[in-house]
Image (cartoon, rainbow, N blue to C red):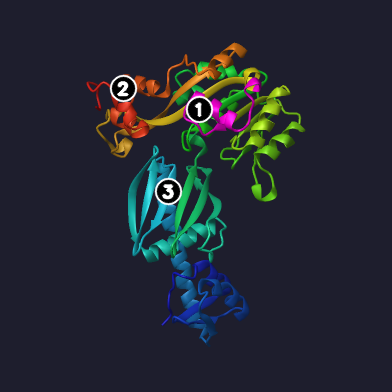
Amino acid sequence: ESLFTARVPAEVLLNTRTMVVAETKTQVFLTTLGSERQAAVEVQPFYPEAEIVFVAGNFEQVDNYLEDVRAMLQDDDSLVDKLLRRAFSEGVSDVHIVPRYSSYTVFFRHLGVRHHVHEGDLDEYNTLAARIKDLSRMDLAERRIPQDGGFQMEYNGKLVDLRVATLPTGANEYVVIRLLDPDRVQPSLNGLGITRVAEWRKGVSRPDGLCLICGPTGSGKTTTLNASIKEMDRFGSSIFTLEDPVEYRIPYLGQVNTNPALGLDFARGIRAFMRSDPDIIVVGEIRDPETARNAIKAAETGHLVLGTLHTGTIHGALQRLRDLDVPANELVYLLRSVLVQRLLRTICTSCQGAGCQACSHTGYAARTIVSECAYFPGEEDVKKLLKGDRWWPSMLEDAVGKYEEGLTTSKEIIRVFGEEARALISTDKKGA
């Protein structure tokens, strides 16, 4: 009787034309229609502690076994396919596949919040994880270190990119799939909900200087950057972007992936761009003194530099640059505009927050940016900023304004901003 094993992925059994006959704690018995040497090399990593023993098998039995494996592989494909098509149809940004002691769970992240969508046994988890790793061109036998990969699939007549990361958690791996649907990116700055977007536009319309988009991971910074770039003259200006990694391709741009393994980091990328006749340089993240220094150098020599920082306020952005050894006197001449943003879920217009099919019964159907934004037309404005002055509405004030307009709920604002938001919210409004 042939033995199916979730340990060896179906692809390996089919490639080597091998059947697993039996397994004990110390030995694995195989029969193969191909090369025994190749089968041993490819199967051994899945049984690091066991000896591999080949036994004679009959052709028909092995052939039938491989047919069953092929059918099982098609089932795996349909499981992955079904899961991802459902995720795309529901507008999900990330899929989390979480193994536990004797089962596994699938979560979808929708509008920034995780929801439980599926529960299955470990056999199903093993086939699902192996199939996803194979599609992502990862090492199937390696379960001890994190891996990154990706693949494409067809959805609604277009190819969409999926980025995959695995994390070792004991005997199994936590798998995260990020769905990059090009149609989901808002094409225009106007559609993102940035209250003082005119202040940001003034900065990015300047021929030189430094413009910053700030906020935590997952606050929509890349989307705002892309929307800003799409408004620029991509024929008349030479625009280069340095990203980790490039998520969405934009025509007529030089988009470069950082590759630290080969020494291509943000700092080195900016230096390379400077020799490539740029007008505008976009730096995915200013995270160390050398990148900050090179970004400032590019801004000083007549280029417009757009970058992102992980800070929560405009004053925090300034402090972060000072921490990265950028002298205050250089910022006085170079800082143009700073936009700090986060994402808030907005009430579903179909059901007014009650919960319906359109919003997957969450009461929320989309997200909007809440932000604080300031433009610095001259040196005096930056000097006022350096002294700690503020003449723009804070991000929390902007969020409360959107709540008072009926766009969101007090519960959502408290979820995003914590207890400090409660004092600012009048409880007589809807959603309190």
Residue 350 x %, y %: 30, 29
Residue 384, quarter of picture: top right
Distance of label 1 from label 2 (alpha carbons): 22 Å
Question: What residue would you read off at disc 3?
Answer: 95
The amino acid at mark 1 is Gly
Sooner in the amino-acid sequence: mark 2 or mark 3: 3
Type of amino acid under label 3: Val
Which label lies toward us, 1 or 2? Answer: 1
Asked if the stretch drawn in magenta spans residue 390, the answer is no
Q: Earlier in the sequence, mark 1 or mark 3?
A: 3
Where residue 254 sits: x, y (%)? 68, 35
Q: Who comes first in sequence, dot 1 or dot 2?
A: 1
- Residues shaded magenta: 308-330
Q: Which one is nearer the viewer's eye here, 406 or 270?
A: 270
Which amino acid, by three-letter code, is at mark 2? Leu
Quarter residue 97 falls in: bottom left
Q: Quadrant of the N terminus?
A: bottom left
Frontmost of labels 2 and 3 is 2
In front: label 1 or label 3:
1
At 37% across and 53% down in the image, what residue appears? 106
Q: Residues within 10 Å of mark 2 (few under 14, many from 20)?
A: few
According to the image, label 1 marks what residue? Answer: 316
CB within 8 Å, label 1 to label 3: no
Q: CA distance from mark 1 to mark 3?
A: 32 Å
Q: Which mark is residue 424?
A: 2
